[in-house]
Image (cartoon, grey):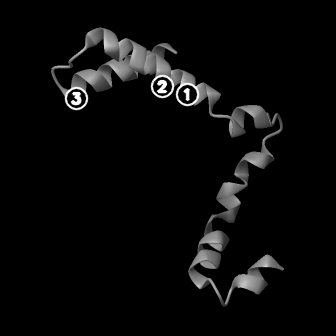
Amino acid sequence: MFIEEYEEQYPEVIDALRQGIEDSLQFYSFEDFDSKKIFSTNMQERLHREVRRRSRVVGIFPSQEAYVRLVTSYFLEY
């Protein structure tokens, strides 16, 4: 088994694997599993492009809070 083979060589890695394997594989329990949406970053990249497009129109923001408000309002709208 993988864990038994590498446990002595990499104890920290195997410990992290044991602690996080259930969380890492949790999305397989969903009934309607669409691997294209989970494994692709297209949707995320599209959101980032829209935020960049909208922030370029403003140019310089008066504060970081103003930028956060713009991004948050776009995400809520989306």
Residue extending furthest bottom? Answer: 8
The residues tagged by marks 2 and 1 sit, at their Cα atoms, a distance apart of: 5 Å
State the image coordinates of residue 27 (x, y, percent, origin top left). 73, 46
Q: Dot 2, crowdedness within 10 Å: few (<14), some or many (≥20)?
A: few
Which one is in front in this view, the residue at disc 3 or the one at disc 2?
2
For the residue marked with disc 2, what is the amino acid? His
- Is label 1 in a helix, a strand or a loop? helix
Dot 3 and dot 2 residues touching (CB under 8 Å): no
Relative to 50, say whether 42 is above or below: below
The residues tagged by marks 1 and 3 sit, at their Cα atoms, a distance apart of: 22 Å
Q: Earlier in the sequence, mark 1 or mark 3?
A: 1
Q: Dot 3, crowdedness within 10 Å: few (<14), some or many (≥20)?
A: few
Q: Residue at x 24, y 21 (%)?
A: 66
Relative to 9, say whether 32 is above or below: above
- Is label 2 in a helix, a strand or a loop? helix
Dot 2 and dot 1 residues touching (CB under 8 Å): yes
Label drawn at residue 37: none
Q: How many marks?
A: 3
Q: Earlier in the sequence, mark 3 or mark 2?
A: 2
Work out whether residue 14 or residue 29 is closer to the camera in this orientation and state it. 14
Residue tagged by mark 2? 48
In the image, 38: left or right of 34? Answer: left
Residue tagged by mark 3? 64
